[in-house]
Image (spheres, rainbow, N blue to C red):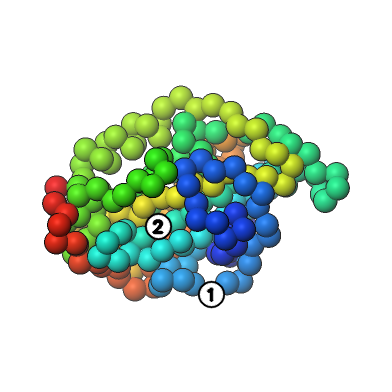
Amino acid sequence: MKRRTMLTAVGGGVVATAGCLASIPAGDDDSEPEYGIEIETDDALEAVDIGFGVEVEEGATPESPAKLNITMYNHAGDGATSFAQTVETGPDPPFSGRIGENENDDRLVLEPILIEGDDTRGEHVDGDCWRASSWLLESILEYAEGEGGSISLDASGGLYLTYYLLVHPDADGCMPAGTYRFESDQYGVDDHTWGFDLTLLEPITATASTDAESD
């Protein structure tokens, strides 16, 4: 079962920074797609009172790749009876899935922005595409597969992080239209994974800035 969501009000509209803990308001389950991107999220972890949301913060531009905010939030209890809980996670919560693939084997990459104010680096740029370099992909995959930990979520609180959406280094072109599946199983819950389907309603390209260096 899936739930369509865009969570346009994550964190009360505050711009996301790395690893932010925040009180998470209810999202809009029927929002229109933004920037030509539609997102459909799983319900898989709701049985253990963990909710997730994904929103598009920015579309791709010549200055920056597209950005996604991914949120993990605690909805244990209800209203006045809600309570904090500790959740096991991967090494860089809330989401450790890094590769999204469509039915044609086209692949996209999520790069977590782990430093507040981190700017797009030159190695992201390749012609008209915001592309992950080979060493960058190797680095973020190695980190995502590392040892996890645990995090305490306050009652009705949550954690959110911003990610760049990049083309896989082995892709021939930019981002073809289609539905890409992203998934992670690092939540300390047996036989549970969580993920989302990201649909590009049209191909995404962005002309690189002239002062950036390609890989």
Q: Quadrant of the N terminus?
A: bottom right
Separation of marks 2 and 1 at Cα, in angstroms: 17 Å
The vertical placement of 37 against 144, above or below, is below
The residue furthest right is 80
The vertical placement of 146 against 210, above or below, is above
| Res 32 label | 1
Quarter of the image for residue 175 reads bottom left
* Residue sitting nearer the eye, 158 or 210: 210
Is 131 left, or right, of 35 in this rendering?
left
Name the spot of residue 104 as percent of width and height, x first.
30, 60
Residue, x 59% and y 50% (percent of image)? 52
* Residue sitting nearer the eye, 190 or 139: 139
Asked whether residue 213 is in view, the answer is yes
SS at mark 1? loop
- Mark 2 or mark 1: whose residue is earlier in sequence: 1
Residue, x 74% and y 42% (percent of image)? 155
Quarter of the image for residue 199 reads bottom left
Q: Residues within 10 Å of mark 1 (few under 14, many from 20)?
A: some
SS at mark 2? strand
Q: Amino acid at mark 2?
A: Lys
Q: Amino acid at mark 1?
A: Glu
| Res 67 label | 2
Name the spot of residue 27 as percent of width and height, x first.
64, 62
| Res 144 label | none
